[in-house]
Amino acid sequence: MSSLRFSALKELGATEKKIGHYNNKKVSAMFASNVFTGRAMREYLSDEAYKSLQASIKAGAKIDRKMADQIAAGMKTWSEERGVTHFSHWFQPLTGTTAEKHDSFFTIKSDGTAIELFDGDALIQQESDASSFPNGGIRATFEARGYSAWDPSSPAFIIENAFGKTLCIPTIFISYSGESLDYKAPLLKSVLALDKAAVDVCHYFDKNVSKVTPTLGWEQEYFVIDEALANARPDIVMCGRTLIGHAPAKGQQLEDHYFASIPERVFAFMQDFEQEAYKLGIPLHTRHNEVAPGQFECAPIYEEMNIAVDHNALLMDIMTKIAKRHKLMVLLHEKPFAKINGSGKHNNWSLATDTGINLLSPGKTPRTNLMFLTFFVNIIKAVHDYSDLLSAAIASAGNEHRLGAHEAPPAIISTYLGSYLSGVLDEIEERVKGKFNEQDEVILKMDIHKQIPELMKDNTDRNRTSPFAFTGNKFEFRAVGSSANCASPMTVLNTIVADTLKHFKKDVDALIEKGDKKEIAVMQVLRSYIAASKKIRFEGDNYSDEWVKEAAKRGLSNFKNTPQALKSIITSASKELFSRNDVYTPRELDARYEIVLEDYVKKVQIEARSLGLMVTNHILPAAIEYQNVLMQNVKSLKELGLEEESYRAQLKLVKLISKHIQDINDNVESMISARKVANKVEDMEKRAAMYCDTVKIHFDKVRYHTDKLELLVDDKLWPLPKYRELLFLR
Ligand code: ADP
Ligand code: MG
């Protein structure tokens, strides 16, 4: 038997323990060594260029051409000293991966001299014929030009591997007519909108605040499996997940993997990618085993959102590349294996002021307390008003498998505040009946600060089932999928909070104008927001069936699948929200909707094809081969003159296998016809719904019978690595 499975298993045994590229250095000694940091800028730029760049980073001011030439020259010297020969505009198109187009510094002057050159033009803007990037119809082919434009707020960095080094310039990617074609441009706009709205509200309490920045700390979950075994599975190679495979005898029920010691081969891989990450200034801080066998997590120290998003995108890239060095494969898919936990990417989100305050950290004085409560309540109100947009922002073909399953937040958005803060909100709502009066100022004096840290230390009060939980000094958006670009959910969160804060300010100002004292006006509006957003608050078990019923009673959305959830992107409420905050134009939203639908269709289509081919080319032949062995055996026993009783089991197996083969075949045929029908439908919304309702529904049926065959067929004949091999061998 010489299937790919068995040669992979043989190879696995022979894999020598890789020492990796571990260099024994302190993290601080290598941290950001490949980044054009403030320090590098100081060293390589003239005073004038340095100041102009800093101003542009702080205020988003434009850099003039002359300055850009100087900055480019400084970057070039810095990177050439480190062995860089090429540069690339680095961006995050809507494909979900990162994109680079390398250009050499090298050029030939008109007189034939060969020199290296990198000027301001090359730094600031590049034209790329990127018509094959998703654009949702924004770029007709006759106007296929796209531009990548330098984003000075994210520092340039050097990507290195054993064969060379490239200077990467973080950029945004836009169409000729100015529409955004990437994740970053809208994110930056949402950060700006939030900054403005939050600063305005801060001024009720603290006039010194002049900038508010959202912060993000992501927790990246992933699976690691042996590369040779992975390569023996067409589904993993094509789709990043298994489409078939019976659960192993032992899954995660013993809970012996979570926080257990990290297997050495994986540990070597972690050390290796962490070092690469450190050089790029990615402040990784924790690593551990996750709940499922073969599943792990890493998380950085949180950063300013723009940088944190870049760092997560970079890290996913690095992990994928470095794994190869160790003959491992990283699976970032949300649900690589059925019946065991999937992977998420918790987005820890907060707001920081330029005066050093975390706005979601309960204050020490009545004044800062009220500032905390103000932001806290506005966020809850935003989540309440726009929960459907949050659902849409995390919906994808991969995350669809995870949401609602027991390890992940359900598709119903709710927010968990903890019993203490819930109580505070209830009290405000109760106590301040009707017109709020001066006596109620006592609420302002509640010592929230002292209580919360105590509360959060108590793990029993931590609700791990909530999709959007307050965790002491930040909100944790847990429903985000592991392969997602954080920018997509974060753009929505920033925008809905910005918009709510703007409304809040209007409401408070109106009361002040009528003669209310400022604090009283704030409390009045908070009280009305608390009352209006009650239905989004849930402290119980989000996985329970009771919650599904209760949520329906409350009128909360429960999107059963991705196409349904995505519809919220293009409602008039969504279009108005995003245009009045200058984040997306209606046209950009239409385009994005088209792109995510198409992405969904393509992913399900690839899965359907892979599944069809795999069962037809790999599974059915193995089943038939085994059936032939059984029949030969029956025939021989018969020839010996034995009665039927002595080959009853064999006959039963032969029949059982036939039944499964038939069922697989029938379902594959229906799946293919459904796909053909769906492909003829021009309208992308309809096509996506059809892929979901008529194509995808066959997956489980094909899988059911295939997994039964896996239990019946001789192990020697089974062509694909099994779950126990993928998950437990390394
Ligand atoms: P866990 O949620 O697993 O208990 P922690 O609460 O320590 O872990 O933090 C998880 C993530 O939250 C980390 O990436 C951390 O950097 C991030 N985080 C902590 N404080 C903030 C903040 N103010 N803003 C954004 N992210 C934060
Ligand atoms: Mg967490």
Image (spheres, grey):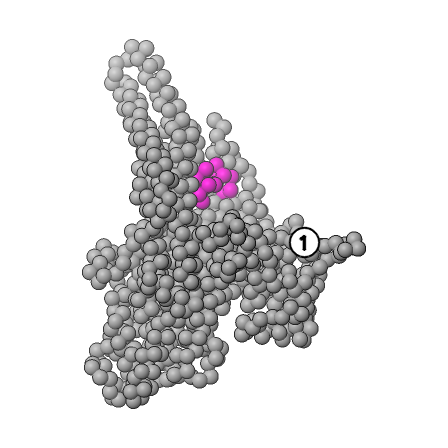
Question: Toward the viewer: 477 or 121?
Answer: 121
Q: Quadrant of residue 692?
A: top left
- Foreground of the two, 45 or 109: 109
Q: Which SS class for mark 1?
A: strand
Task: Give left or right: position of 680 versus 60.
Answer: left
Q: Residue at x 27, y 56 (%)?
A: 558
Choose top left, top right, bottom left or bottom right for residue 383: bottom left
Task: Give the tally of numbered discs.
Answer: 1
Residues drawn in magenta: 226-240
- Give the crowd class for mark 1: few <14, some 14-19, many >=20 residues within 10 Å: some
Please give the name of the residue rendered at 51% of the width and 59% of the height, measured from the top-left corner: 177
Q: Position of residue 205 (x, y in %)?
A: 39, 83
Q: Position of residue 399 (x, y in %)?
A: 38, 51
Query: Which residue bears the numbered disc 1?
Result: 104
- Magenta-colored stretch includes residue 229: yes
Residue 694: give x, y in percent of width and height: 31, 41
Q: Is residue 654 above or below residue 122?
A: above
> Which residue sits at x=44%, y=52%?
136
In this picture, residue 384 sits left or right of residue 318: left
Q: Amino acid at mark 1?
A: Ser
Q: Does the magenta run of residues contain 728?
A: no
Would residue 250 be visible to someone looking at this image?
A: no
Q: Magenta: predominant secondary structure element?
A: helix
Q: Does the image show residue 253? A: yes
Figure check: 51 above or below 331: below
- Residue at 37% of width from left, 84% of height from top? 367
Q: Is 428 located above or below residue 553 in the figure?
A: below
Q: Is mark 1 within 8 Å of ligand 1?
A: no
Where 371 sits versus 301, above or below? below
Q: Looking at the picture, how far across and down is residue 466, in whole percent?
A: 32, 61
Q: Which one is nearer the viewer's eye here, 681 or 645? A: 681
In the picture as drawn, the residue positioned furthest to the front comes out as 142
